[in-house]
Amino acid sequence: MKFFEWTPAYATGNEEIDYQHQNLFNMANNVHDMMSSGAEMRLAVDIFFEQLIQYTDYHFTTEEKLMQETHFGEYTQHKAMHDALRKQVIDFQKKFKSGEVDISTELMEFLKSWLTNHIQHTDTKLGKHLATQS
């Protein structure tokens, strides 16, 4: 069983957003597999941070652009959640690179919790809003 299992419960109804969410799940599963197989932990996590930061910026930019274009009423709150995650991931990365923390399961559990809760409680609202704009 995958660490991050995509199910229809995570679908927002927006094809582009759902595809990007699935990619985030796949990225997390890839690093989890590397860590579970005994691959060099520091290298696996370092690669994951770089990919995660780049891809979440891309994904959040996509969502934020859609929210602005369609005048989504919860844009400010939604963007604030994105900004908070960006900051948390960058903080995790800095601490990891400096050797201050050795992140593995803790990081994966945090990301799993944040991503699944954010999708199910926040992004589904955006998906419903976008469906009314068609």
Image (cartoon, rainbow, N blue to C red):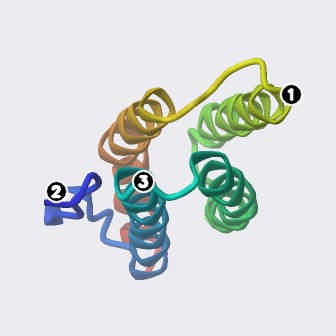
- The residue lying at 37 percent from left, 41 percent from top is 112
The Cα–Cα distance between marks 1 and 3, rounded to whole angstroms, is: 22 Å
- The residue lying at 37 percent from left, 61 percent from top is 33
Residue under numbered circle 3:
38
N-terminal-most mark, 3 or 2: 2
Residue 66 place in picture, x, y as percent: 63, 67
Q: Quadrant of the C terminus?
A: bottom left
Judged by depth in the image, the label closer to the viewer, 3 or 2, is 3
Left or right, residue 95 beside residue 129: right
Judged by depth in the image, the label closer to the viewer, 2 or 1, is 1
Q: Is residue 32 above or below residue 91?
A: below
Residue type, mark 3 in image: Gly
The Cα–Cα distance between marks 2 and 1, rounded to whole angstroms, is: 38 Å
Pointers 3 and 2 in contact (C-beta within 8 Å): no
Judged by depth in the image, the label closer to the viewer, 1 or 3, is 3
Left or right, residue 53 beside residue 29: right
N-terminal-most mark, 1 or 3: 3
Residue under numbered circle 2:
9
Residue 115 place in picture, x, y as percent: 42, 44
Residue 13 place in picture, x, y as percent: 30, 71
Quadrant hosting residue 99: top right
Residue under numbered circle 1:
98
Q: Quadrant of the N terminus?
A: bottom left
N-terminal-most mark, 2 or 1: 2
